[in-house]
């Protein structure tokens, strides 16, 4: 299944190549899931793995704050939600 894993990872790297931790997580999941997908035509047909790696929703917001010098700093925060199918989203916010 290595050829399928490599092909899938190249597709993900084309859009998420700068996210090394994300790519590592996707690779680990792909290694575990692709053999099952290849053996189960209905999973392959509905593109389960392609759906898993695309977020359902991305929320971006700004966070203004005062630094030690009294200067206003503005940072961008994100919440990326991948799948709400089995219940509420888990995780927190990223700055």
Image (cartoon, rainbow, N blue to C red):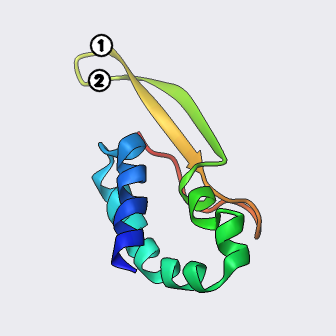
Compared to residue 61, the image places residue 5 above or below, namely below
Indicate the quadrant containing the N terminus: top left, top right, bottom left or bottom right. Answer: bottom left
Residue 71 vs residue 84, the one in the foreground: 84
Quarter location, residue 8: bottom left
**Lateral position of residue 91 relative to residue 89, left or right:** left
Secondary structure found at label 1? loop
Question: Which numbered tag is attached to residue 67?
Answer: 2
Question: Which numbered tag is attached to residue 81?
Answer: none
Residue at the (76%, 70%) spot, across then down: 86
Residue 58 vs residue 36, the one in the foreground: 36
The image shows residue 50 at horizontal and vertical percentages of: 57, 58
Q: Are marks 1 and 2 in contact (CB under 8 Å)?
A: yes
Neighbour class for label 2 at 10 Å: few (<14), some, many (≥20)?
few
**Which residue is label 1 attached to?**
71
Residue at the (35%, 54%) spot, across then down: 10
Secondary structure found at label 2? loop
> CA separation, marks 1 and 2?
5 Å
The image shows residue 71 at horizontal and vertical percentages of: 30, 13
Compared to residue 18, the image places residue 46 above or below, namely below
Neighbour class for label 1 at 10 Å: few (<14), some, many (≥20)?
few
The image shows residue 2 at horizontal and vertical percentages of: 34, 77
Indicate the quadrant containing the C terminus: top left, top right, bottom left or bottom right. Answer: top left
The image shows residue 7 at horizontal and vertical percentages of: 38, 61
Compared to residue 70, the image places residue 18 above or below, namely below
Q: How many marks?
A: 2
**Lateral position of residue 7 relative to residue 54, left or right:** left
Quarter location, residue 23: bottom left
Residue 2 vs residue 21, the one in the foreground: 2
């Amino acid at each position: 299944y290595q050829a399928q894993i490599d092909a899938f990872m190249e597709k993900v790297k084309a859009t998420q190549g700068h996210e090394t931790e994300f790519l590592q997580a996707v690779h680990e999941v792909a290694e575990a899931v692709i053999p099952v997908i290849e053996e189960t035509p209905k999973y392959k047909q509905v593109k389960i793995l392609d759906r898993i790696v695309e977020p359902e929703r991305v929320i971006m917001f700004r966070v203004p704050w005062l630094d030690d010098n009294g200067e206003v700093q503005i940072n961008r925060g994100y919440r990326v939600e991948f799948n709400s199918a089995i219940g509420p989203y888990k995780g927190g916010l990223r700055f």
